[in-house]
Amino acid sequence: MSMQAPIRLNDILLVLVVISSMAAAIIFPDFGSRFKVLPFYCLMANFFLSYLSIDFASVLKAIKGQGVRILLFTVVKLAILPVILYLVFYYVAPDYALSALLLTCVSTGVVAPMISNMVGGNSALVLVVVVITSAVAPFTLPVLIKIVAAKEVTISFLAMLQMLATVIFIPIAIVEIIRYLMPRLVAPIQKIQFPVSLFLFALINLGVFYRYAPFFRKEPSVIIIAMVMAFVLAAIYCVVGIALFWKGSMENQLAGAVMLGNLNNVLVIVFSSEFFGPVEPLVAAMYMIPFFVIVIALRYYRHRRTRAA
């Protein structure tokens, strides 16, 4: 098991940048409006940087012998659990039902294998699920929105599909082209990945949240509620992820929690700001906090289970 600190300095810095840039957009909307055309392209650039660390050839090897288990988990992750949580939130907290649907059925975050390493999970399994859900989510997410939330949403299915497919598949294609034609560029780009990602996160929030400044100023309590909802969802994801692998090893239980809990919330921020808002992108942004707090919770779970055994 990795002996890294539960929360690293970089993680704290990332959360601070996300929250401060969101606050800046709300307090200074005229400044934020200057970046309104950037979120879509910044998201693609962020995915490009993230996918550089994934070797898609090694993923194919990791799938061998785990196909059925991965398939079942993917179906639960992208189809069954999103519907269940949407219905639960629809009756308990209807204003946040769409947020629950979007966050639950989005792909597993590309940093999930790193998080899995930090808590001692099955990182090979996590890596495979990252790649599979990234490829499948652009198709399943619009379908679920149109089927489950049809009464609330009148958005074109093709518009949603086109947006998601563009931001996911073009960065993957560029990464593979660079790996094949200019492999020497990979290492230098990876060295600057974190500071560039921070800058991209800030630009995304500035370009998204300025448009909701009047709403948040009028309803500041929504920000606190959104944070609470983000933690509630994170807790549900961890519990369900562990339960799905309850009869398996500790490493697989932790991997299950990571695969559900560490999701592509930045994609949800940009996607929901295009088609929904303001609550949905806000909850997605607030999820950045439990995104890393999950590490502490899972390490505590592993410690307790190990002592009990």
Image (tube, helix red, strand yellow):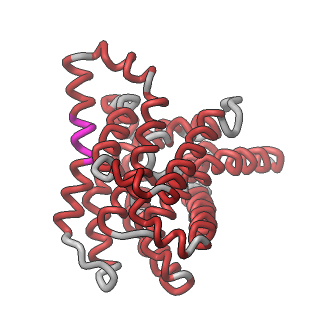
Q: Farthest residue to the right: give it.
A: 307
Coordinates of residue 1 in the picture (x, y in percent): 67, 32
Q: Farthest residue to the left: give it.
A: 158
Q: Is residue 43 above or below residue 138?
A: above
Q: Give the range drawn in magenta.
A: 167-173
Q: Is residue 269 above or below residue 129?
A: below
Q: In this view, does 119 lie to the left or right of 143?
A: right
Is residue 30 visible in the rendered image? The answer is yes
Q: Is residue 115 above or below residue 68?
A: above
Residue in the picture at 23% in, 73% down: 155
Rendered image quadrant of residue 79: bottom left
Rendered image quadrant of residue 98: bottom left
Q: Farthest residue to the top: give it.
A: 184
Q: Is residue 147 left or right of residue 187?
A: left
| Of the pair 16 and 183, the residue shown nearer to us | 16
Coordinates of residue 241 in the picture (x, y in percent): 56, 57
Give yes or no for residue 55 being in the magenta stretch: no
Q: In this view, does 148 lie above or below 307?
A: below
Is residue 258 visible in the rendered image? The answer is no
Coordinates of residue 308 in the picture (x, y in percent): 82, 50
Q: Exactly how many numbered labels are in the figure?
A: 0
Q: Is the magenta stretch mostly helix, strand or loop?
A: helix
